[in-house]
Image (cartoon, rainbow, N blue to C red):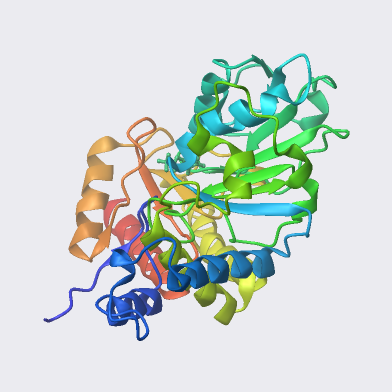
Amino acid sequence: MEEKKTINFGAGPAKLPRAVLLQAQRELLMYNDTGISVLEMSHRSSDFSKILSKTKNLLVELLKIPDNYKVMFLQGGGSGQFSAVPLNLIGLKEAKCADYVVTGTWSEKAAKEAEKYGKVNIVHPKLDRYTKIPEPSSWTLNPAASYVYYCCNETVHGVEYNFIPETNGVVLVCDMSSNFLSRPVDVSKFGLIYAGAQKNVGCAGVTAVIVREDLLGHALKECPVVLDYGVQAKMDSLYNTPPCYSIYIMGLVLEWIKNNGGSQEMEALNHKKSTLIYDLINASDGFYACPVDEACRSRMNVPFRVGKADGDEALEKKFLDGAAQRGMISLKGHRSVGGIRASLYNAVTVEDAQGLAAYMREFQQEHQ
Ligand SMILES: *Cc1c(COP(=O)(O)O)cnc(C)c1O
């Protein structure tokens, strides 16, 4: 079959490394010498048990996860964790309250879900647009909060933290779904980190949860058992059937990251790719415009408007059509913000980003 040349800038599910897809293809019908596919394998078999521990060990190695943390692979996506986090952690302290920093769609949804289970304090005045991170010195953190929650890369709005918030000893929880393993991170600063795989480390179906051991066993009594960190950690993610194939794919992606220089090299490449696009936007005399503050522009998701600051919709449609003709797909911005969004996750290559930059330059020359 002749291959169609397509560059996928999708926000998630997103591009996977070619080498990973080829290996999955080679192994699809028969995994090692088992005679069966991973898709058909018992989750209690020794072969799957090796896949699970390999994936877990790679995560521990790549993120230098300290010994006093547990790694789990759960279902329900990032959205499942919006509920799991308060169900497991809001009862850590008597007051049953939690602090949330709301810098975009995803942290907003998480805060809303947490309100079902306890008292939620948004630590800053509500933002009218999600284009910046409120100055941390202005946050009103509650020392009696069970945890402080934030999302370190807002996938829809393209807002990314380049610092870890100081919480003065209160447990810190982070949604890293869309920049997981895109750079090194000091796990010891967090009580809990979670990340859905389909943005940066695999396919949909599995969410990696990294939790400090002393936070286990505090779930509210109404917490569904499949979301109970204490139960899932004790059962090594095997309380019930885990998303076996998605865990296998994550293992292949982690191996690929390791073979390509780990999180440090991912960071260098992600910096290079995103700088290419942001520099071009900045130098475009306003033809392209990114609404996000320069200090917190995401290296993973680059949102921008075409033609004028709030977007010329007809021109943006033309931009997307021209991109599609060149095989560049999934560049349409999220329906809630419009415009264009280029997602530049780990699997997107520097050449892919250069291709987009070349097209953007050409499009500006033609339509300015
Ligand atoms: C995609 C995403 C989610 C939601 O993930 P689902 O798997 O669709 O539930 C949550 N948080 C962030 C930052 C995301 O990018």
Is 359 situated above or below 94? below
Left or right of 62 on screen, residue 338: left
Left or right of 320 on screen, residue 73: right
User: Residue 263: x percent and y percent?
Assistant: 64, 68
- Name the residue furthest bottom: 33
Q: Quadrant of residue 90?
A: top right
Residue 348 visible in image: no
User: Residue 244: x percent and y percent?
Assistant: 40, 59
Left or right of 72 on screen, residue 284: left
Q: How many marks?
A: 0
**Which one is nearer the viewer's eye here, 329 or 119?**
119
Residue 259 visible in image: yes
User: Residue 85: x percent and y percent?
Assistant: 60, 32
Residue at 27% across, 36% down: 313
Is 255 situated above or below 140? below
User: Residue 330: x percent and y percent?
Assistant: 29, 52
Left or right of 274 on screen, residue 204: left
Residue at 34% across, 69% down: 38
Residue at 40% across, 51% down: 241
Q: Say which quadrant the N terminus sits in.
A: bottom left
**Which one is nearer the viewer's eye here, 276 or 197?**
197
- Name the residue furthest left: 1
**Which one is nearer the viewer's eye here, 326 or 175?**
175
Q: Quadrant of residue 133?
A: top right
